[in-house]
Amino acid sequence: MADVPYGPQTKITIERKGHVVLFGINRPSIDNRLDPEATEGLARAYYDYDRDPSLRAAVLFGHGNRFSRGVDVDAYKAFAQSGHKMMDGPGFIDPLGRSGPALTKPLVVAVHGDTWNMAHELFLVADIRIASEDTEFGQDENTHGRFPGGGATVRFPREAGWGNAMRFILTGDHWGAREALRMGTVQDVTPNRDAALAKAIGIANKIAACGPLGIRTSLASSHLAIEDASAALAKLDAQYRALYATRDFREGRDAQAEKRPPVYEGP
């Protein structure tokens, strides 16, 4: 996939850093709210990342003073009235993870400032989540006569526990990074935005240094386990046998024996 550099008209930036790619939400003048074009841009970026064999991990972040305040309601209303459909056709991976295809590679997210509603739902899709100390999370759709339709009603209770999720979904109260860490939706809290992004990139680079076939298999097995633990357990032997026959499996063993860093090829 190609870089999409930062610019005033660029809604989603793309920056490759070796085997890692960074996706940036870039609508700071409207609180990084996502309109249909930005959402589809992110969906295309996820699709291209997932199919680029040179990329092994991705980081999502927000430009400006906040990660995102969620949906650009006026833009979405106008789009709905136009009669067009979102992500209509191939070449997209829904960044909210509501329908297939799904990402098969790791996604790390770094958030800071306001991370509200749809933005929190984008955050929950990620495999690993880092938050700046100043992050304020919100899932307050019910206070506006709506409800969290982007996946929070599924992922938030699963990640944080029923009572923790309902505490915020049903009241619309906001919460901070330390509360998110307590609930388990955040894996690390950093002093500021730059530190959060640096931490996320560091984690992505560690992932990228691992065997990409093993990483994909680990994600696939773990996702299946959420839906059907018995089915996930039943597939483990077949998954291991498939990896055993790969060049990357042999390289991992050889590198360990020779006390050198492994050089994985992936798919």
Image (cartoon, rainbow, N blue to C red):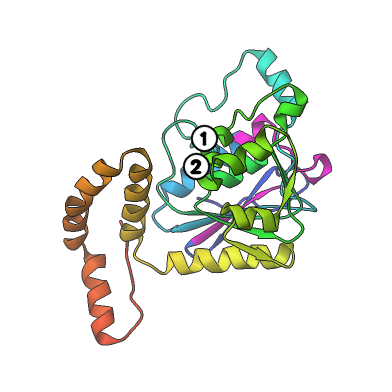
The label on residue 158 is: 2
Is 178 rendered above or below residue 209?
above
Q: Is residue 103 left or right of residue 196?
A: left
Circle 1: residue type: Val
Residue situated in front as seen by the camera: 109 or 124: 124
Q: Position of residue 227 (x, y in %)?
A: 36, 38
Write down the residue under mark 1.
154
- Residue at point 43%, 39% (across, down): 102
| Magenta run includes residue 25 | yes
Residue shown at the point (50%, 37%) measured from the top left: 97
Q: Which residues are magenta?
A: 20-39
| Image coords of residue 230 (percent x, y) | 25, 42
Number of numbered discs visible in the structure rendering: 2
Q: Quick check: marks 1 and 2 in contact, CB under 8 Å?
A: yes
Element at label 1: helix
Hey, which quadrant is residue 145 in on the image?
top right
Residue 249 versus residue 161: which sits nearer the camera?
Answer: 161
Q: Does the segment drawn in magenta span residue 1?
A: no
